[in-house]
Image (spheres, grey):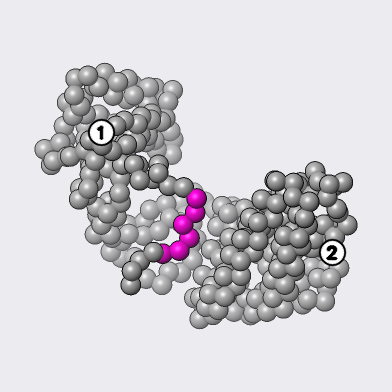
C-alpha cells in the first residue's frame, strides 16, 4: 500500500477505495500533511515568518485526523480484539500534541530557532504516517466489515477533517423514508431496559445516578412554569425539597428576584432570548447561575433549565494539570 502514497496525487487512490471511504480520506489527509512538511523544508525565518505561521496553523489541523482515529477507528478495532492502537498509537498522538504546542509557542514568540520544534513535529508526523500506511490502515481494512465503514460518516463529520471542503459521504446517501429508523451500529450491550437518547442508551437508575453525582444544581421548569424536576446531590449550592415539585416557579424565588425570573421566562417563550447568566457571592462561594431555554425540534418552547454551580475552585485554577496527584 505504501508505494503509491509517495505520489502526492489522490487519483492514485481511484479504484482502490471508493470516494469518501474513511481510509481513503485518511490517506488524502496524509497527502496534505506531506505537502505541508515539504513546504516547511524550504522555509526560513524571519524571511518566511507569515508563511510559516499560516502553514503551521494548517498543519495543526492534524488534531482532527488524530481525534477521528481515537474516537472512530480505534473503537472498531477494539471490537475485533486489536487494542494496541488505542494503547500505543494514541500515546504517540499525545507526544506529537506536545511537540505541536512547543512549536506553536516558538512561532508565536518569533523565536529565531522556531524551525527546530517545527522539524520535530514534521519528523514525528512522517513516522506516524508510515505506521498508519504500513500497518494500521491495511489491517483495519482486513478487520472491519463494509457495514462497519458505512457507520463512520456522521461521527467523522462531527469531529471534522483537515480539508477546507468536506469529503464525499460514504456511502453515497440514499433516500430514507422519515418513518424508517436510522441505522446504528451493533452495540455490545442489551437495550431492552434502557431509554434511547440522542446518542446512547441509559437505564433510569443510570440517569438518576448521573444527576445525583454531577456537581451542578439542575432544576427543570416545564412550559407551564411548574417545577417538574431537580437533582438531589449531596453538595447542592441551593437547598431543594420534594415540596417544590409541581409548584409554580414564581413561588420558588424570593420577592426581590421573582420579577427577573418572570422576565426570563417571558423572553424565552417569545423566542427573543435563549440564555440568561448570573454570578454571585454566596456563603463564601462564587456561584455561577445560568438559565437555558428548552425547545423541541420545531423550536417550540418546552421549559427552562436552571443550572447553578460553585465555581470557586475552578476560578482559581492556573496553568496545566496533566497528572494524577493521588496518594496510592
Q: Nearer the viewer, residue 109 or 77?
A: 109
In front of the other: 70 or 80 = 70
Q: Is residue 179 magenta?
A: no
Q: Which residue is mark 1?
A: 282
First of labels 1, 2 by sequence position: 2
Residue 243 sits in which quadrant?
A: top left
Q: Is residue 322 magenta?
A: yes
Q: Quadrant of the N terminus?
A: bottom right
In this view, the residue in front, 213 or 160, is 213
In the drawing, what numbered circle is on residue 8?
2
For label 1, the SS is strand
Q: Position of residue 164 (x, y in %)?
A: 72, 48
Residue 2 horizontal/vertical position (percent): 78, 76
Look at the image and tell me whether residue 129 can be seen.
no
* Front residue of 62 and 316: 316
**Mark number for residue 112?**
none
Instruction: Determine the residue positioned at 69% across, 55% down.
Output: 103
Amino acid at each position: 500500500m505504501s508505494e503509491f502514497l509517495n505520489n502526492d496525487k489522490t487519483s492514485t487512490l481511484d479504484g482502490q477505495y471508493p470516494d469518501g471511504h474513511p481510509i481513503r480520506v485518511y490517506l488524502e489527509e496524509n497527502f496534505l500533511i506531506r505537502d505541508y512538511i515539504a513546504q516547511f523544508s524550504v522555509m526560513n525565518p524571519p524571511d518566511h515568518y507569515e508563511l510559516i505561521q499560516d502553514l503551521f496553523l494548517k498543519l495543526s489541523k492534524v488534531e482532527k485526523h488524530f481525534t477521528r482515529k481515537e474516537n472512530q477507528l480505534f473503537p472498531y478495532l477494539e471490537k475485533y480484539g486489536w487494542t494496541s492502537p488505542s494503547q500505543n498509537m494514541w500515546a504517540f498522538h499525545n507526544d506529537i500534541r506536545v511537540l505541536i504546542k512547543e512549536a506553536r509557542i516558538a512561532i508565536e514568540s518569533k523565536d529565531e530557532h522556531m524551525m527546530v520544534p517545527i522539524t520535530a513535529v514534521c519528523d514525528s508526523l512522517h513516522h506516524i504516517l508510515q505506521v498508519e500506511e504500513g500497518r494500521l490502515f491495511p489491517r483495519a481494512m482486513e478487520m472491519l466489515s463494509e457495514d462497519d465503514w458505512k457507520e463512520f460518516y456522521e461521527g467523522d463529520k462531527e469531529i471534522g477533517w483537515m480539508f477546507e471542503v468536506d469529503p464525499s459521504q460514504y456511502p453515497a446517501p440514499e433516500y430514507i423514508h422519515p418513518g424508517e429508523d436510522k441505522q446504528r451500529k451493533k452495540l455490545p450491550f442489551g437495550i431492552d431496559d434502557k431509554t434511547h437518547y440522542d446518542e446512547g442508551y441509559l437505564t433510569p437508575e443510570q440517569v438518576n445516578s448521573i444527576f445525583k453525582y454531577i456537581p451542578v444544581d439542575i432544576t427543570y421548569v416545564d412550559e407551564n412554569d411548574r417545577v417538574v424536576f431537580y437533582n438531589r446531590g449531596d453538595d447542592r449550592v441551593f437547598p431543594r425539597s420534594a415540596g417544590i415539585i409541581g409548584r409554580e416557579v414564581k413561588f420558588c424565588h424570593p420577592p426581590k428576584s421573582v420579577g427577573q425570573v418572570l422576565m426570563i421566562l417571558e423572553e424565552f417563550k417569545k423566542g427573543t432570548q435563549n440564555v440568561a447568566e448570573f454570578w454571585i457571592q454566596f456563603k463564601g462561594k462564587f456561584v455561577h447561575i445560568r438559565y437555558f431555554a428548552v425547545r423541541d425540534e420545531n423550536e417550540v418552547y418546552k421549559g427552562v433549565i436552571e443550572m447553578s454551580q460553585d465555581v470557586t475552585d475552578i476560578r482559581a485554577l492556573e496553568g496545566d494539570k496533566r497528572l494524577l496527584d493521588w496518594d496510592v
